[in-house]
Image (cartoon, grey):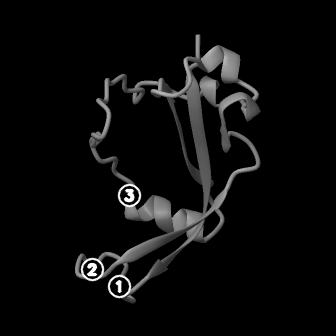
Amino acid sequence: MDFNQLPQERITTAVIAPKSGIQLAPGFISLQDVEDVQLGKKHMFFWGWAVYQDGINTNPRLSEYCFNVEGATFSKIDHADFTGETLLGTTPCGVHFCFNEDCEDYRNRTK
């Protein structure tokens, strides 16, 4: 699957100093979307990557991740009850779950 064909408006560029972190804006997933995944009507996944330099290696580093959402567990019978919890069950995708030169798109991502 070529994820680059998906909408790219959520791509974020950032500079992160050593021993620091970054928090991105939260995304919204509707209850209907989660229930549709649970029923097998929709497919949902989380995918992203980070290109960075570290202090040990002069070559660019790449971490790429992809998780399929396999289903959801709701702590309340009423899924819309905000006092309940929703846990998403995920498994690694067969592609785009890699590091550095093991990624097929390493050269393109680290240009």
* Pick the front one: 65 or 72: 65
Residue 82 in percent (x, y) is at 24, 76
- Disc 1, disc 2: CB below 8 Å? yes
Q: Which residue is mark 2?
A: 81
Residue 47 in percent (x, y) is at 55, 42
Q: Is residue 7 above or below residue 83?
A: above
The amino acid at mark 1 is Asp
Please tell me in which quadrant of the rendered image residue 6 appears: top right
Q: CA distance from mark 1 to mark 2?
A: 6 Å
Which numbered dot is residue 30?
3
Crowd around label 1: few <14 · some 14–19 · many ≥20 (10 Å)? few
* Pick the front one: 85 or 32: 85
Q: Which residue is mark 1?
A: 78
* Pick the front one: 56 or 87: 56
The amino acid at mark 3 is Ser
Q: Is residue 30 above or below residue 100?
A: below
Please tell me in which quadrant of the rendered image residue 87 appears: bottom left
Q: Residue at x 76, y 49 (%)?
A: 94
Q: Residue at x 57, y 37 (%)?
A: 63
Please tell me in which quadrant of the rendered image residue 107 appears: top right
Q: CA distance from mark 3 to mark 1?
A: 15 Å
Q: Residue at x 70, y 24 (%)?
A: 105
Q: Residue at x 39, y 55 (%)?
A: 29
- The C terminus appears in which quarter of the rendering? top right
Taking the view exactly as shown, the residue that stands out farthest to the front is 56
